[in-house]
Amino acid sequence: MPHPHRWHHPLCLAPRALRPWLTEAGSLTARLIAHHPDFQVRVLKQQAARPHQDELATLCLASGVRHAPTREVLLCAGTTPLVFAHSVTTAVAVRRGFRKFRHVGGRSLGSLLFASPTIARSRLAWCRVDARHPLWRKARKAVGPLPRRLWARRSVFYAGADRLLVTEVFLPPHF
Ligand SMILES: C=C(O[C@@H]1C=C(C(=O)O)C=C[C@H]1O)C(=O)O
């Protein structure tokens, strides 16, 4: 059976209010701060983890790779989670183009990525994830009960040959 989650879901199916968020080409962090002065980053995990199946090709990783530097956060307004963000890169990248990745801590990764003129970004891609997808299950674990399907977007940041894949899952009830 083909993998049910493909990253080119038609954007016209997204709720109108969500579309500006799904298509924001600048920093999502900056957009969230503009709407929520009490914006906060809650770090859930920053460690090596097995990349998701649908991340391997994008990061040019072989399917046997078990340890890719990974960061998972909740982007919150006060204590209310708005977005679950999952970022993954390669062992080489954190020693080269994305050296600062491991030291972001409680700051937003966006503040690092968009501050660097040498880091470029790919086009965005979209997907509706459900319980079959690890992103849905991770978000569920972090925030509790969720609707059956969630909108997610992702893009690759490039520092020379190095890649960092950032995926953002939009959480109800806010989105
Ligand atoms: C890529 C950005 O950074 C955001 C912040 C993240 C973090 O701190 O881990 C992760 C993904 C993004 O939602 C952005 O602001 O657009």
Image: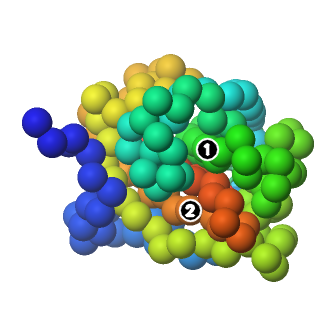
Instruction: Please state the total of marks drawn on the protein image.
Output: 2
Q: Residue at x 42, y 51 (%)?
A: 57
Q: Nearer the viewer, residue 18 or 9?
A: 9
> Element under label 2?
strand
Q: Quadrant of residue 111?
A: bottom right
Q: Position of residue 172 (x, y in %)?
A: 44, 42
Crowding at label 1, few (<14), some or many (≥20) Cα neighbours within 10 Å? many
**Residue 64 placed where, x, y %?**
46, 30
Q: Residue at the far left: name it.
A: 1
> Callout 2, which amino acid?
Val
**In this rendering, is residue 78 above or below 33?**
above
In the image, residue 160 sits, relative to residue 110, either above or below, namely below
The numbered dot on residue 156 is: 2
Residue occupying the point 26% across, 45% down: 5
Q: Residues within 10 Å of mark 2 (few under 14, many from 20)?
A: many
Query: Residue at left 53%, top 52%?
Result: 59
Please name the residue that numbered disc 1 is placed on.
88
Q: Does ligand 1 reach within 8 Å of label 2's beta carbon?
A: no
- Under mark 1, the amino acid is Val
